[in-house]
């Protein structure tokens, strides 16, 4: 089953960039299609592969000493941003 995941990581520290950069490096080196913008990262792929990537990228953040907040949404379909039709919402 193809899925689309949107995820945002918010380290609760003033030194947030190293944590975010490592998190994004793990996502983008996973081999899955991923798009990062200023607010979130969208990941597209097979459910099991996305969940494996999520475990690899997210577990170190959760186990670290810095408190983090994570926001995620998942869709049970492959819907990359270039396929959205904003005209349909007018």
Image (cartoon, rainbow, N blue to C red):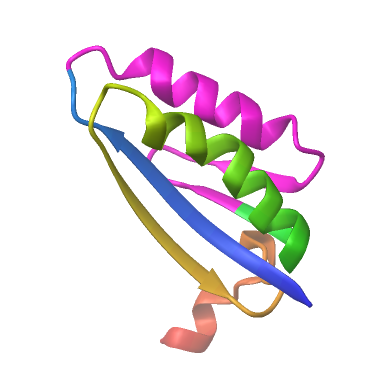
Q: Is residue 32 above or below residue 71?
A: above
Task: Say whether residue 49 is visible.
Answer: yes
**Is residue 81 rendered magenta in the image?**
no
Q: Depth check: 36 or 3 in front?
A: 3
Task: Say whether residue 46 is visible.
Answer: no
**Is residue 17 rendered magenta in the image?**
yes
Q: Depth check: 81 or 40 in front?
A: 40
Percent from the top left, x then y, of residue 88? 52, 87
Percent from the top left, x then y, of residue 15? 25, 12
- Relative horizontal placement of residue 25, taking residue 66 as reference (left or right): right
Residue at left 55%, top 30%? 24
Magenta extent: 14-42
Q: Is residue 12 above or below residue 2?
A: above
Residue at left 61%, top 61%? 81
Quadrant of the rendered structure where residue 84 is?
A: bottom right
Quadrant of the rendered structure where residue 56 is?
A: top right
Residue at left 76%, top 37%? 30
Rendered-image quadrant of the C terminus = bottom left
Q: Depth check: 35 or 6 in front?
A: 6
Residue at left 72%, top 67%? 47
Percent from the top left, x then y, of residue 9? 37, 40
Rendered-image quadrant of the N terminus = bottom right
Percent from the top left, x then y, of residue 17? 36, 16
Quadrant of the rendered structure where residue 85 is?
A: bottom right
Count of marks, rendered view:
0
């Amino acid at each position: 089953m193809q899925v689309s995941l949107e995820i945002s990581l918010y380290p609760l520290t003033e030194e947030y960039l190293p944590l975010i950069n490592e998190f994004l490096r793990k996502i983008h080196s996973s081999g899955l299609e991923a798009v990062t913008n200023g607010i979130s990262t969208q990941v597209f792929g097979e459910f099991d592969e996305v969940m494996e990537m999520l475990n690899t990228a997210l577990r170190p953040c959760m186990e670290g000493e810095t408190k983090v907040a994570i926001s995620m949404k998942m869709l049970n379909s492959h819907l990359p941003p270039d396929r959205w039709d904003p005209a349909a919402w007018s």
